[in-house]
Image (spheres, rainbow, N blue to C red):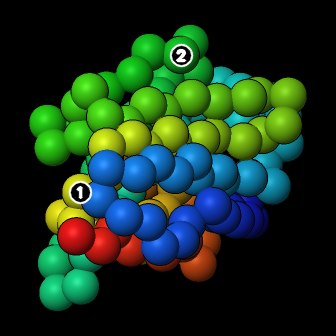
Amino acid sequence: QVQLVESGGGLVQAGGSLRLSCAASASGNIFRIVAMGWYRQAPGKQRELVATISSLGGTNYADSVKGRFTISRDNAKNTVYLQMNSLKPEDTAVYYCNRHSIDGPVWNWGQGTQVTVSS
């Protein structure tokens, strides 16, 4: 079973930046051929998809983060990143990564990493 470990969250003021990392225990042969995604869940809200990156590096973003967040991956390290700039209080949430598919997330969720943006 693949394990996902997210890190890099913290408390930041509005307008600040954070870089999240997600390490997957999947074999390198698997990780490099799957799409990955970053999701977030704010208190009292459903988990939502924030950004995806295909095996070839193609990216997509939710409208709410477009132009501010950048997803990237390092297949040699089985790691996916989320660079978050110009953070807003509404970005406050627990952030998770997962393998992304047309049917949604595939692997078991990790513990996530808390991002808190103060106004």
The vertical placement of 39 against 52, above or below, is below
Camera-side residue: 111 or 1? 111
The vertical placement of 87 against 4, above or below, is above
110 sits left or right of 40 in the view: right
Q: Secondary structure at mark 2?
A: loop
Q: Earlier in the sequence, mark 1 or mark 2?
A: 2
How many residues crowd around disc 1 within 10 Å: few (fewer than 14), some, or many (20 or more)? Answer: many
61 sits left or right of 112 in the view: left
Quadrant of the snapshot with the N terminus: bottom right
Q: Secondary structure at mark 1?
A: loop
**Residue that badge 2 annotates:** 57
Identified at 14% across, 36% down, the residue is 63
Residue 43 image point, x, y percent:
24, 85
Amino acid type for the residue under numbered disc 2? Gly
- Locate residue 64: give its quadrant: top left
- For residue 88, which numbered disc appears in the image? 1
The vertical placement of 26 against 78, above or below, is below
Q: How much space separates mark 1 and mark 2, taking CA atoms?
A: 26 Å
Camera-side residue: 32 or 12? 12
Identified at 78% across, 49% down, the residue is 26
How many residues crowd around disc 2 within 10 Å: few (fewer than 14), some, or many (20 or more)? Answer: few
Amino acid type for the residue under numbered disc 1? Lys
Choose mark 1 or mark 2, whichever is in front: 1
Residue 12 image point, x, y percent:
44, 66
